[in-house]
Image (cartoon, helix red, strand yellow):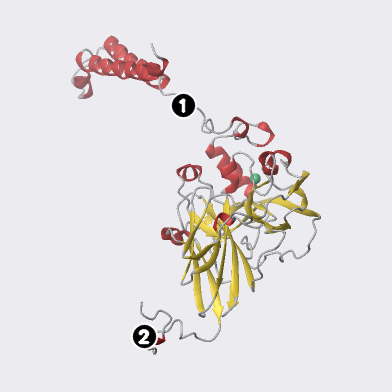
């Protein structure tokens, strides 16, 4: 008999035995009369009937076998709790977390400042760049009054934007804060080598590890924690961007910003106040409670530019489930580096409305701001705007009626740029 039918057969036997048991109780044990208290049940037959029911249930359970939840992952990435303890029951994990949460560091504002972009690299030679980062598990607000447990690089989500030059050797030290409950590491997509660095940076709480790597290819790359369960670490906020400037540099612009989309999975649904617990089922279903630009629901506009300025935004997607359809309402990207690709052979896209930013990927968009006002950065899968996927760009300056104005045009058709069209 083919093994694949074994479990089904066990369950069919179980159901059959249960049915026989029920029939036995009805027919032989005077069950209905007994229920209506009109007669005493026949003891022997009752025992046989319930015995058959019990046996049937055992067969059904024996046929209902599943692997552990992480079985489909690569074998070296099966989830393990600290100190190699097996993962505890979710309810025990929740109680454990609630108990430990009172000692967790608090962060006033978890959100990385989109203005904090390292200066473009102007030097014309390679060097050794030393970078130190600290993984830290903290509590901070997704929105006022909603407290979430973030796992971070340097206490912020996304982690700091890093910047090196093509050809540089990077010496990266990763410290896991002693208050952390979990191990962490770092996988930089700019790295060529096993795990992108994750295999040699796995740090226990209080531990520091260093590794060196050569930035061989230019581009904008995601970095993230790759400690198992990887998607759990990422969806707690452990990601950021590293820019590897091409040797020749990028064209100069007036203002650069840093924006990374990410997802939070919390129990109790969107808007639930207080300390919210992680929702592993929503993670596996790919249905985040919040989709954020820079870690939380924005409380005040932080990106400000002047009319006429040329803007570049380094956009990333920490994921872990959704592809971002990055768009700015009321603006057209003059230039897009699709998938943040650059260098010989890669083509720039011109005049783009919306660009895909893949989970674990990035894009670079450039545009000149011509008309003052408020512009909203969104993931144009717009239901996600309801979940927090937006940020405001403010453009200051005098009106530009030649491009945009309320009311009727003052120009004759022959004077427009699109004459005859
Ligand atoms: Cu981690």
Instruction: Say which residue label 2 marks.
Output: 413
- Left or right: 155 as drawn, with respect to 30: right
Cα distance between the residues tagged 2 and 1 = 70 Å
Q: Alpha-carbon neighbours of circle 1 within 10 Å: few (<14), some, or many (≥20)?
A: few
> Ligand 1 is found in which quarter of the picture?
top right
Front residue of 257/277: it is: 257
Residue located 46% across and 56% down the image: 270
Q: Position of residue 250 (x, y in %)?
A: 66, 64
Which mark is on residue 66? 1
Q: Position of residue 218 (x, y in %)?
A: 67, 54
Residue located 53% across and 30% down the image: 71
Q: Position of residue 299 (x, y in %)?
A: 55, 68
**Which of labels 2 and 1 is toward the front?**
2
Front residue of 81/313: it is: 313
Front residue of 297/106: it is: 297
Residue furthest to the front: 420
Whether residue 317 can be seen here = no
Whether residue 279 can be seen here = yes
Which mark is on residue 309? none
Q: Where 263 sits versus 79, above or below?
A: below
Q: Where 351 sits versus 279, above or below?
A: below
Q: Quadrant of the C terminus?
A: bottom left
Label 2 secondary element: helix
């Amino acid at each position: 008999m083919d093994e694949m039918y074994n479990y089904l057969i066990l369950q069919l036997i179980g159901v059959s035995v249960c049915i026989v048991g029920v029939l036995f109780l009805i027919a032989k044990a005077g069950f209905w009369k007994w229920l209506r208290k009109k007669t005493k049940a026949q003891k022997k037959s009752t025992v046989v009937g319930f015995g058959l029911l019990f046996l049937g249930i055992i067969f059904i359970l024996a046929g209902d076998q599943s692997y552990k939840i992480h079985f489909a992952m690569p074998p070296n990435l099966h989830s393990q709790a600290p100190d190699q303890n097996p993962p505890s029951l979710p309810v025990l994990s929740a109680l454990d977390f609630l108990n430990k949460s009172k000692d967790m560091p608090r962060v006033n504002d978890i959100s990385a400042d989109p203005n904090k972009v390292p200066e473009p690299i102007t030097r014309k030679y390679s060097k050794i760049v030393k970078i130190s980062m600290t993984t830290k598990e903290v509590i901070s607000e997704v929105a006022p009054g909603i407290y979430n447990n973030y796992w971070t690089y340097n206490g912020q989500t996304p982690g700091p934007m890093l910047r090196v030059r093509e050809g540089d050797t990077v010496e990266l030290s990763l410290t896991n804060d002693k208050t952390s409950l979990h191990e962490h590491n770092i996988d930089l997509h700019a790295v060529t080598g096993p795990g992108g660095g994750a295999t040699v940076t796995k740090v226990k709480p209080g531990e520091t590890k260093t590794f060196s790597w050569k930035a061989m290819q230019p581009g904008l790359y995601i970095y993230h924690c790759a400690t198992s369960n990887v998607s759990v670490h990422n969806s707690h906020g452990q990601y950021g961007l590293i820019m590897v400037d091409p040797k020749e540099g990028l064209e100069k612009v007036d203002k650069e910003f840093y924006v990374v989309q990410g997802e939070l999975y919390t129990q109790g649904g969107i808007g639930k106040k207080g300390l919210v617990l992680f929702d592993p089922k929503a993670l596996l279903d790919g249905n985040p409670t919040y989709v954020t630009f820079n870690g939380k629901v924005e409380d005040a506009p932080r990106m400000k530019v002047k009319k006429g300025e040329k803007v570049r935004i380094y956009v990333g997607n920490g994921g872990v489930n959704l592809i971002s359809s990055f768009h700015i309402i009321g603006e057209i990207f003059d230039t897009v580096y699709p998938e943040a690709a650059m260098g010989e052979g890669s083509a720039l896209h011109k005049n783009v409305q919306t660009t895909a930013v893949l989970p674990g990927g990035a894009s670079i968009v450039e545009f000149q701001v011509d008309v003052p006002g408020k512009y909203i950065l969104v993931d144009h899968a717009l239901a996600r705007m309801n979940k927090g996927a937006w940020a405001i760009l403010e453009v200051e300056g005098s009106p530009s009626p030649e491009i945009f104005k309320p009311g009727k045009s003052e120009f004759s058709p022959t004077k427009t740029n699109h004459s005859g069209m």
